[in-house]
Image (cartoon, rainbow, N blue to C red):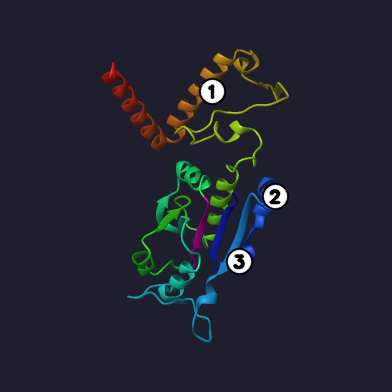
Amino acid sequence: MTFAATILTLYPEMFPGPLGVSLAGRALERGDWSCETVQIRDFAYDKHRTVDDTPAGGGAGMVLKADVLGPAVESVGTGRPILAMTPRGKPISQERIREIAEGPGVAILCGRFEGFDERIFEAHPQIEEVSLADIVLSGGETAALAILDACIRLLPGVMGAPDSGVEESYENGLIEYPQYTRPQEWEGRTIPEVLRSGDHAKIAAWRKARSEDDTRLRRPDLWERYSDARDRSASGARRKD
């Protein structure tokens, strides 16, 4: 089954962009996924093809019009998640990325200017308001590329090794352990001895400990969620005993 990606945008020329090269590009050529763009401006109804207007109540910038966005969204049909890229949205997670990658595809609505007329979400509650991170971009297109890349690399056969998408940051609630490769020594720094030991149990234990330590120090928000989940799991196991 082909993973079908549809991007609703004012700048269709931005796609597939970097997704047309490397692993994603080869997967596109094989037909593992498809990339369709929808020009939002095509749904404007006046002679100037207007897609935005000034904010109600005043303020800087322009707002994308609900009466243009509505028919654009309706044109993509149903059966796939529809994401709207906006800094007001819920930060997307690796768990949600994996859910999307396991489905038939995704449609992504790319914001511009001051964002969307809120009534588009009231009229179409199936739209998920999503953000990439706590940053503000010029438009949703670059965020959409990142989300598509995250999905495409999880499609069967794209990365090659089956474990490539499992032992990574966020897949188990932690950031990934540090990686090393040859040469064994570089500028006086050596690969940790445990990784050269050949003892797979010790290596696994070292990697788990480093993932936990680095997550605790670098991402206390992730560490708190991971610790809570671990404590709940341990508590449930004790109750069963």
Q: Within the magenta stretch, is there residue 112? A: yes
**CA neighbours of label 2 inside 10 A, class few (<14), some (14 to 19), many (20+):** few
Q: Farthest bottom residue?
A: 47
Tell me the mark number nearer the camera, choosing from 3 and 1.
3
User: Would residue 61 be seen by someone viewing this image from the given angle?
Assistant: no
Give residue 39's position: percent from left, percent from top: 56, 70
Q: Earlier in the sequence, mark 2 or mark 3?
A: 3
Q: Is residue 28 left or right of residue 63?
A: right
Magenta residue span: 104-113
Give the vertical position of 180 relative to 40 (above or below): above
Q: Residue 207's mark?
A: 1
Q: Which mark is residue 30?
A: 2
* 171 in magenta: no
Res. 12 mark = 3
Please identify, in this view, whether the residue under mark 2 or under mark 3 is nearer the observer: 2
User: Seen from this angle, which residue lies furthest left?
Assistant: 239
In-front residue for pair 198/96: 96
Q: Position of residue 169 (x, y in %)?
A: 52, 35
Residue flagged by tag 2: what amino acid is it? Arg
Q: Nearer the viewer, residue 36 or 112?
A: 36
Residue 139 at x, y percent in the picture: 52, 62
Q: Closer to the camera, 107 or 213?
A: 107
Query: What SS does tag 1 mark?
Result: helix
Q: Amino acid at mark 3?
A: Pro
| SS for callout 3 | helix
Q: Are marks 1 and 2 in contact (CB under 8 Å)?
A: no
Instruction: Give me the C-alpha separation between circle 2 and circle 3.
Output: 22 Å
Reply above or below: 60 against 149. below
Q: Earlier in the sequence, mark 1 or mark 2?
A: 2
